[in-house]
Amino acid sequence: MTLVAAVFFGLLIAGMPIGYVLGIAGLVGMLSIDPGGRFLQMAPERFFAGLDLFTFLAMPFFILAGEIMNRSGITDRLIGLADALVGYLRGGMAHSNMVASVLFAGLTGAATADAAAFGTTLVPAMQKKGYTRPFACAVTAAGSIIGPTIPPSNLMVIYGSLMGVSIAGLFAAGVLPGMLICLICMAVIAALGRRLNLPRGSERPSLRRILVAFKDGIAALVMPVIILGGILGGIATPTEAASIAVLYALVVGGLIYRRLSWSELVDILIRTSRITGMVFLIIASASILGWWMTFNQIPQAIASAFLAISEDPRVIIGLILMLLLGIGMFMDINAMLVILAPVLAPLTVAIGMDPVHAGIMIILALNISLMTPPVGACLFVLASVTGERIERIAHSLWPFLIAEMLILILIAYWSDLTLFVPRLMGLVD
């Protein structure tokens, strides 16, 4: 066990991609069980079994649909709608950034995609209006995690597929937490407005301007309705809804907005393949390491250690959150989800948590780790597309980070809030 841990962290510190780190550590674990190498024959089978879930097909379709809509000028149209709604407030463009994150969340389901899109559009626009670049990046980072919290969410697809939890239930349960993140971040912006002397927006928009902005963005706003309506209404599976979303994105981008060329479609397919391949490599490699952990009963040992500290569900939930946020500062969230979900999910069941509630708590904690240094993926994306230093972004980010952690605590300890929408729709008891 010590050898596997040394190999894992040694390769991680050396900078090797996490997918290879997981696979090599898993192979070392198999060899540690049987130096003769007989268990190595299971590695290809485990590698394939880690991906042999039909619902995983939804992930590349969601990624592809988001890429198509992003290349179709959707970002600018959604920003225009958000600006028409809240742009007149003090710190108007920061508020618009948050509202646009909610609108954009129904298209991509990935925080890094949102960070990249707004980092190249809204951050420069905010700078021109008088915002500092670190603050503009911090607002964008804080809003980016709304994407994988409000459905569709790739993390929810992975968690639901691995743990046998209703993906429709997870999608429904993510709506309120995502909206709460937006509202509390807007409250932080309002509180900072006078202290930082944030620029005021233009005068209150007319009804005509709002209607025009809504008309320009209506085609984009229909996509989340198609995805969620199909899944939550029981009309389509997540995979079927995702494939329909791709078709709709092609129609909107190619025929309505006329912003897609054949060369752009090739680039979109290549980018989708790269993102999907990276995520699937992590999942497949993690299944090998996960088998080794199960063989050595490590999940049971961790659960026993937690319960030895306390059997109070409130304490256990606090320990789980600290574990996720702590490891999330140094590790890729997809790898964390695949490795830790089989460990933590049975523990949440043991303390009486609803599986959907536990899933949302785990996913939200992982989303927050996307914006925590030193390995927060959204910070790296924003630093690369804006040229700002990570430490300067992190310094401006802390009020938003504290606010979102408070939301996480609220979600973790108040199950009725998380399960309100799924219960309303009859998806959970």
Image (cartoon, rainbow, N blue to C red):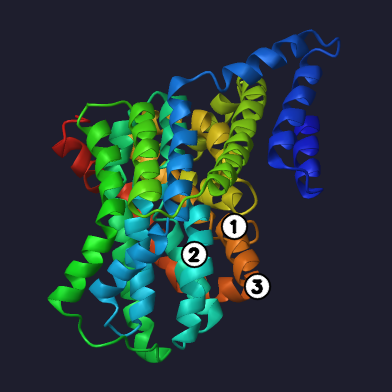
Residue 179 in view (yes/no): yes
Foreground disc of the pair 2, 1 = 2
Furthest residue toward right? 36
Give the mark, 2 or 1, whose residue is nearer the N terminus: 2
Q: Which quadrant is home to the N terminus?
A: top right
Pointers 2 and 1 in contact (CB under 8 A)? yes
Q: Position of residue 272 (x, y in %)?
A: 56, 41
Find residue 5 and name its label.
Answer: none
Eyeballing the image, is 346 above or below 17?
above
Front in this rendered view, residue 194 or 269: 269
The residue identified by callout 1 is 376
Q: Which quadrant is home to the C terminus?
A: top left
Kind of residue indicated by mark 3: Gly
Eyeballing the image, is 349 above or below 222?
above
Label 2 residue SS: helix
Eyeballing the image, is 10 above or below 346?
below
Label 3 residue SS: loop
Kind of residue indicated by mark 1: Gly
Find residue 141 and name its label.
Answer: 2
Going 56% across and 23% down the picture, which residue do you hit? 51
Q: Position of residue 411 (x, y in %)?
A: 32, 50
Front in this rendered view, residue 108 or 356: 108
Give the mark, 3 or 2, whose residue is nearer the N terminus: 2
Neighbor class of circle 1 (other Cα within 10 Å; few <14, some 14-19, many 20+) is many
Q: Position of residue 309 (x, y in %)?
A: 50, 40
Q: Is 163 left or right of 12, judged from the image as shown? A: left
Kind of residue indicated by mark 2: Ala
Find residue 387 and name its label.
Answer: 3
